[in-house]
Amino acid sequence: MSSESSFLRFENVEKRFARRGKVIHALTNTSFEVPQGQFLTVVGPSGCGKSTMLNLIGAFDRPTSGSVLLEGRPLAKPGRDRGMVFQTATLFPWKTVEANVAWPMLVGGMRKKEAKARARELLALVGLRGFETSYPGELSGGMRQRAAIARTLGLEPKVLLMDEPFGALDAQTRELMQEELSRIWQATGITVVFITHDINEAVFLGDRCLVMSARPGRVVADIPIELERPRGEATKRDPRMADYHAQLWELVRNEVDGAAQATTGRAAS
Amino acid sequence: MKQTSPPADRSAKAAARQAPERVSRVVAVREWMLDQQWPVALTFTSVVVAVWQLVVDAGALPAYLLSPWAILAETYGMLESGELLPLVEVSMKREFSGFLLGAGLGVFAGLVAGVARWTGDVIDGAVSLLYPVPKIALLPIFAIWLGFSDTTRILVIALACFFPAYLNAQSATRSVDPHVVAVARNAESGKLRTIFQVLLPAALPRILVGVRTALALSFIMMFATEVIGAGAGAQAGLGGRTFAAGTNGDYDVLWAALLTIAVLGVTLDTTLRVLSARVTRGAAKEMASHG
């Protein structure tokens, strides 16, 4: 019953929450759709509700009003069909890398032997062959994030939710991880919603990029990124990358400036 | 062609495979010394003991300070005469029962308080009221109720052990990274599974810090509870015997009992340390790589 265009859908979503006695209006009137298999990136000024949006899809949080639908069903609680990758890897430090990746599969009722084999496959997919028996503490930041991606893929999610997953990595590792993720996405065909504050990253990875406004966040621009796949090092030197970057930066900058003015000029509210 | 791009961190893997490189013997010995703490500790202790023995032999110390050799000889004497082991048995029964009861309840209550915040808020009121009270001050109160019995002593020891175990377990559980719990929720892990397979192991290193503190406290409290209202014979325990020896001027017995307590304490603490290093080995690696 899921028509392709309404695979994942935000309908007039509002989100307010209270923090330290103040009401924060995180998202307002947010509506968009993500077709199955699309790689969607989201950029915007910090604090614009990007992470809130992801938490709503993950259903770690509920919208104040409006609805978030996956294949036409409203999302009520966290589930294996939406796999989350956080900014830091959050692996279990007491388990080996392989056991970390296998754990969610065991929770899902898979047999130990099967889970182990599948974990090995996934670790190979993310380029961690040979590190199965290492502990997370023995890996670099980039390798840990690869392991976290493998663990999330083990949930067999329909949507991969990524909240600035490369934000904590050094510049070189980040570049390589972007290429790797592009390759993994191509290999799995999974739908991705990817939050970032790095515009180049958003252009390089995305089929399409949403620009969010300053708080309260809403979608101010929806830009298709028409660069050929597979994308790799050569894509990064493509002059169209710079054009997209300029266009998106212009939009984000307006929001950042607007937010700054709103804060300085605010007396009411 | 980018499809098969090699993993970025392969160089690290290659480097790991090439190791171990040849290192000079001097460096190797030094690294081993740094790695092994016991030779250093042993050397230092031997020097202190030797100096102590020499000073006593020179007659430079008052009579109540015995030489290490004299203490060892007396300890052996008490062991052979059959006086020491019953004292150890009585004291250790009190110490260990109190420790297990207090630390066990403390860890359990701490976990519950960390998971379900409202229970924590309820318990914390009572805890903050009782925590600063010297637990030994409660001994006479328990004694009115139960006499100067083993039960009284065990309860007071347990009470003292409860606090460090509870406080560490509670804050350890509360400070587990919420993202780690989110990973479990994402996998649709049930509540009990999340508690036992995620929260507990994540909090374990810090829980064990509290348990070790409780162990040290249990020895202090064992001694203190035995000094007050001490029983006769073996029932005096190591604490009661030490104190009586001090008042009677039996300084050799006093030192022998103290040595016995020290040896028992070190043995139990080392056992606990080895056990906790084993159960938290992955976490220890994590800390090592970040620290």
Image (cartoon, helix red, strand yellow):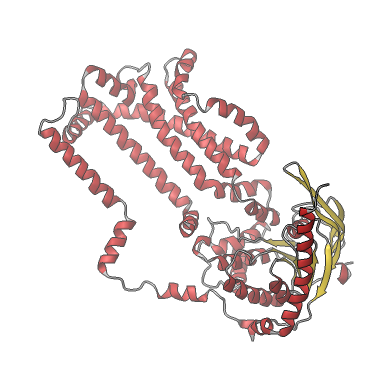
Q: Left of B129 or right of it: where is B213? A: left
In the rendered image, the residue lying farthest to the top is: B144
Q: Left of A171 or right of it: where is B281? A: left
Kindly indicate the quadrant of the structure image that contains residue B4.
bottom right
Q: Left of B66 or right of it: where is B100? A: right
Q: Left of B134 or right of it: where is A240? A: right
Indicate the position of residue B209 as horizontal and vertical percent values: 47, 42
Residue at 44% across / 30% down in the picture?
A: B97
Indicate the position of residue A228 as horizontal and vertical percent values: 75, 84
Indicate the position of residue A168 as horizontal and vertical percent values: 60, 63
Q: Is residue B271 above or below residue A230?
A: above
Indicate the position of residue A164 as horizontal and vertical percent values: 67, 64
- Whether residue A238 is visible here, answered yes or no, is yes
| Residue nearest the viewer, comparing A121 with A31 | A31
In the rendered image, the residue lying farthest to the bottom is: B1
Residue at 27% across / 29% down in the picture?
A: B257
Q: Is residue A81 above or below residue A21?
A: below
Q: Quadrant of the N terminus of chain B?
A: bottom right
Q: Is residue B163 above or below residue A73?
A: above
Q: How many marks?
A: 0
- Whether residue A269 is visible here, answered yes or no, is no
| Residue nearest the viewer, comparing B13 with B151 | B13
